[in-house]
Amino acid sequence: MRVPQLSCFEEWPKGLADCPSSRDIARILPGPRWMAIEGEQKAPLFLSTLLHGNEKTSFHVLSALANDYAGKRPPRSLLIFVGNVAAAALGKRVLDEQPDYNRIWHGGIHDQTPEHVMAEAVKHKVAAAHPFAAIDIHNTTGRNPHYGCVSSMRAADLYMLQYFADIGVYYQNPPTTLSIAFSKICPSITIECGQSGNMVGFNRALALVRHVLALDAFPKDTTLAPEFRLFETVGRVLVDPEKSISFTGDDMPDSDIVLDSNIEAFNFTDLPAKSVFARSNLGENPLRVINEFGENLTADFFDQIDGQIQVKRQVTPAMITSDTAIIRQDCLSYLMVPMDTD
């Protein structure tokens, strides 16, 4: 088993500040890399970048930081993990022979790929440094607003959540993500910066990173603003891998699952009971709703009536994508409900 080598840079790699795109980063970093940049305050901010090779915002944040702190210390030390460089070079989320780099951070005895071993090494390095906080930077494949995800309701996690956007998600599924793993070590957040190339998302991500770097301490209490929308994920919607997928207008009448061509408009929209989520003429629903414990909750959320897959109760979907490759690699959607913080 060949484990990716985590070479450590203690200064910004030459060429990173003016690297033109994430596809070119392999010329500077030939594989997953670890950076330890010394700052004025010792407890480091941990940044996770390029876990998915087609999500470019984290690369641009990394490049901006290399420019910000060229020749000078940041206000706080930085630990940075640069993840799937090989996939980034090809503009792909993940390569066919790889596990998803955001699904390797908690595993059992059967999950001992080289990437899982590498993830364990990263966790040990970060934990040993007693980090101040962890930020994992992502883009969404489908059209979504900017939002953050936390798996702890600590004041520090909520502070970062509210600073980044006016929408937040509390989640425990899937439990193999980096942010959930690091929430056991320090305040931890995943930020979803819209689709790759979204400059507002980039500016928000960079502002959050710069702000956390400059903090002496997190507030002891965080009160969410009345207009802040906080959701809790209740399940992931998975598609039977054996079934075909099409979209309205594709002229594929024999497809097993037909999704609305504008299904991404459902993201962060409250769908009332009896809303049509998908269509299928199969005898058995080809969609499955799975929670963080691996329990099948499909019957709690979907009815199949006259070829329509309808939601049984009001839910709010997120992360819906019309990219069938991503649907099969990850999921079709997450289902959420409003979270009561009282």
Image (cartoon, helix red, strand yellow):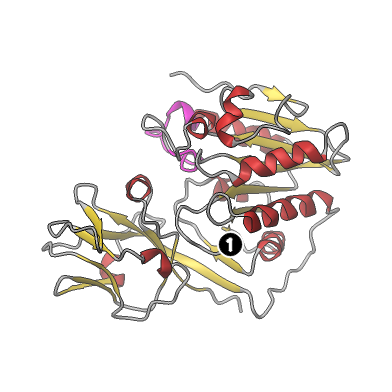
Badge 1 element: loop
Give left or right: position of 76 versus 232.
right
310 over 64 or under it: above or below:
below
For the image, the number of numbered tags is 1
Residue placed most toward the observer, 5 or 326: 326
Quadrant of residue 275 in the image?
A: bottom left
121 over 244 or under it: above or below:
above
Quadrant of residue 33 in the image?
A: top right
**Residue 276 at what x, y percent from top left?**
28, 74
Location of the N terminus (image quadrant): top left
Quadrant of residue 159 in the image?
A: bottom right
* First to last magenta residue range: 100-116
**Residue 50 at what x, y percent from top left?**
57, 39
Q: Is residue 6 visible?
A: no
Identify the residue at image location x=36%, y=65%.
263
Give left or right: position of 180 versus 310.
right
Q: Is residue 25 visible?
A: yes
Q: Amino acid at mark 1?
A: His
Category of crowding for the residue at label 1, using alpha-carbon neighbours closer than 10 angstroms: few (below 14), some (14–19), many (at least 20)? many
Identify the residue at image location x=39%, y=55%.
293
Give left or right: position of 110 versus 194.
left
**Residue 200 at what x, y percent from top left?**
65, 58
Q: Is residue 10 a member of the stretch shown in magenta? A: no
Q: Is residue 108 a member of the stretch shown in magenta? A: yes
Residue placed most toward the observer, 133 or 228: 228
Identify the residue at image location x=87%, y=31%.
71
Q: Which residue is mark 1?
A: 146
